[in-house]
Amino acid sequence: MIDWSFLYLCSEWVVRLTMLLYVPQRRSASAARTWLLFIFLLPWPGLAIYAMVGRIRVPAFRRKLQEQASGQIKKAQAQIGAQIVAQPDLPAQLQIIPQQAKRLGTFEPFAGNAFEFLRDYEKSIDRLIEDIDTAKRHVHLLTYIYRTDRIGRKVADALKRAAKRGLVCRVLLDAVGSRVALNQFGPELQKSGVEVRSMLPVGLFRRKGERFDLRNHRKISVIDGTIGYLGSQNIADPTFVRNFPNEELVVRLTGPVVSQLQATFLGDHYLETEEVLDRAELFPDLKPTGDSAAQLLPSGPGYGQENGRELIISMLYEARRRVVITTPYFIPDEPFLNAICAAGRRENVQVHMVVSKHANQLISQLAQRSYYDDLLEAGIQIHLYRPHFLHAKLLTIDDHVALTGSTNMDIRSFALNAEINLLIYDRQVVEQLKVVQEDYFRNSDLLTREQWSKRSVFEKVAHNTARLMDSFL
């Protein structure tokens, strides 16, 4: 008689031992630890989930499309002209930053840009709608979350008005983050003449279906190729997560760098449609509107490396005076944690981190708090923001460089999501953003090592247990 329970037990050990050899290959120790712990506890379920999402495998067709999209970006940039390429005025140790950003994301720093930083949630949406209502040629919008709520309706109505005036309106929505809007608003917008596309559609039996955890997390709007928006804000009511109203940071930009935002949108459009659009219409001659040098850094699994993570780590190692990071989620891998702690220990360097006191995702919050010991020991000042869930993403290095966009300081944003970040090389802009950061500080509680040491044993266990799940978050 066959003892099925014994055979099953043996099969579990075969899975454990096989994965013990396979999982650590070309993977960080922390990620390997997380997966092996899961597989050792639940061998067959762990093996099944690992087979689906354990490795960041981008399909060959998607990698090829990304290469073709990057080629289009290079071609568009060449057409824009070399006369606006800038040599940012940076200290010697920071001159590597624009060079590395170009190597990673293709775009060069462009001169002659101006920026408006929008912190008021409603006013930033109203500003976008105002630009849509005065557009003359086209409106492009890409977002991760589009909700069928009051804010979503306002933007949808503006798009319909633009289409009615004869403008070309193209909308790209992430298939997971905007699933309901694609089903409810999609047909309505398309009937009005708005092109609506689902990005990275998922499905086991869908042709060219994508993994559910590889998402397009960008938030981009381009009006007539002359006005751009990017930042942290989705098209949704600030209270779309109950009890945690979001506070955002959005950048309205004008000048030559808008062409890079346009190229990024068109690259994503190409990834979904394989359609090459008419560049003559979409890339108008952009005159200088300000004095700032800037460049975009797109990132995502299709690039073959973690663009955002690599650049930010380099920036942290080159800081000499002051680092301020504002992020809704902080779940770093080991190299990133080492870089920020090294900055905190460096003589004469002040490092501040602004995170929300109240988070909207429990497990992520617990895992994030498990790193506070490391940060505090390195001399990093942790500011716990009180008023809202601070969803803004902002990094400044010394008095010279600012980075803002859609990237969170976590493993998911670095490795799994398509993101977009704007690098600004302008001392005056950094000073302007210091005002924003000082306001964050005033509305935060400064966490001390003494306070943090008084947390309960239960809290410590919860934090450290959640930290074991960092590769899943």
Image: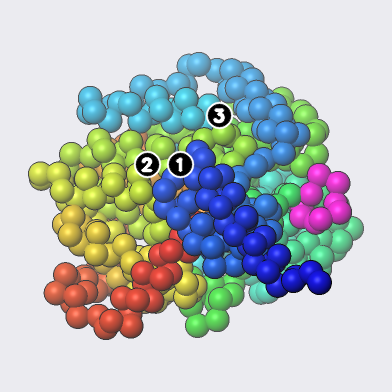
What SS does tag 1 mark? helix
Q: Are marks 3 and 1 in contact (CB under 8 Å)?
A: no
Residue at image location 59% in from the left, 49% down from the top: 18
Magenta residues? 201-209
Magenta-drawn stretch, dominant element (helix, strand or loop): loop
Nearest the eye: 261 or 203:
203
- Picture disc at residue 386: none
Between the residue at mark 1 and the residue at mark 2, the CA separation in whole angstroms equals: 6 Å
Give the amino acid at mark 3: Leu
Give x and y (percent) for residue 176. Answer: 70, 60
Residue position marked by numbered label 2 in the rendering: 312
On the rendered image, what quadrant is the N terminus found in? bottom right
- Picture disc at residue 286: 3
What SS does tag 2 mark? helix
Give x and y (percent) for residue 379. Answer: 16, 57
Q: Earlier in the sequence, mark 3 or mark 1?
A: 3
Horizontal side of residue 66 vs 395, given as left or right? right
- Picture disc at residue 308: 1
Nearest the eye: 304 or 94:
304
Residue at image location 15% in from the left, 48% down from the top: 345
Nearest the eye: 115 or 343:
343
Q: How is the image coloured?
A: rainbow
Q: Is residue 181 visible?
A: yes
Residue at image location 36% in from the left, 49% down from the top: 334
Which residue in the rendered view is the most extreme toward the left?
A: 347
